[in-house]
Amino acid sequence: MFAYSYVHSMAVAEDLVQDVFLKILEQKMDLREYNNVGSLLFTILKNKCLDYIKHKMVEENHMQDVAQANYLIADKYALEDDSMTIITENETRKMLKDAINSLPDNIKEVFIQSKFKDKTYKEIADKCGITTRQVEYQLYKAMQILKEKMDRCYFVLGILYYYIVYCL
């Protein structure tokens, strides 16, 4: 019961008590030399319990180190894995397309003409019947809206990445 109170396992406590008796037998200790044999046995048992606990702590730290190393290896493979890049690029393209499609029609038209069709501000202004200053403003507004929407998208991509790496 003394050993059990330290190690919290009856099987381990029994093994430790047996180890005490084995130590006495192996060292051929003459118990008649000791005034208080019970105290000697408890001291040896206490030291056996302490050794066991220290060993368990080392094992636990090693297991945590191994688990941490496994997480680091998984992170390394995830970062090197091109499929994650492909997923991220595809998701980013889809989110950007959705964000562009959500722009008001006049702003969307100016943005598409400028960014995808490489039209000058003057060409866009003539086509849309607005001034070049209005083209500048609408592009500025489009970029503000897209930046806001894409910031949220990158947050979602971050969550998606975490899920893929740590939950699958």
Image (cartoon, rainbow, N blue to C red):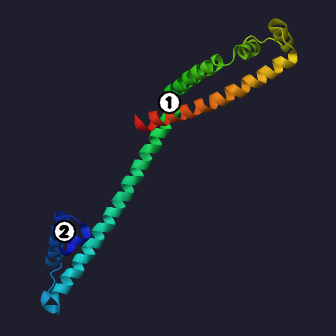
Where residue 157 appears, as percent x and y from the top left, is: 54, 31
Q: How many marks?
A: 2
**Mark 2–mark 1 CB contact (< 8 Å):** no
Q: Which of the two residues, 132 or 165, is positioned nearer the viewer here?
A: 132
Q: Quadrant of residue 148?
A: top right
Q: Is residue 6 left or right of residue 57?
A: left
Q: Which residue is mark 1?
A: 81
- Identify the residue shown where x is 48% and y is 39%: 75
Q: Position of residue 50 (x, y in %)?
A: 29, 72
| SS state under label 1 | loop
Looking at the rendered structure, the kind of residue marked 2 is Ala
Q: Is residue 51 above or below residue 63?
A: below
User: Distance between the Cα atoms at labels 2 and 1?
Assistant: 49 Å
Please tell me how crowded label 1 is: few (under 14), some (14-19), or many (20+) other residues with Cα within 10 Å.
few
**Residue 110, how many percent across, how many down?**
76, 14
- Residue 33 to residue 157: above or below: below
The mark nearer the N terminus, 2 or 1, is 2
Quadrant, the C terminus: top left
The secondary element bearing badge 2 is classed as helix
Q: Is residue 35 left or right of residue 53?
A: left
Query: What's the mark number on residue 103?
Result: none
Query: Image quadrant for the N terminus?
Result: bottom left
Which amino acid, mark 1?
Asp
Task: Say which residue appears at 63% left-offset and 21% top-offset.
Answer: 99
Quarter of the rendering containing residue 143: top right
46 relative to 33 in the view: left or right: right
Q: Residue at x 21, y 81 (%)?
A: 42
- Asked whether 100 or 72 is in front, the reply is 100
- 92 to 129, vertically: above or below: below
Q: Which residue is mark 2?
A: 13
> Can you give x and y, in whole percent of width and height, for residue 77 in the image?
47, 35
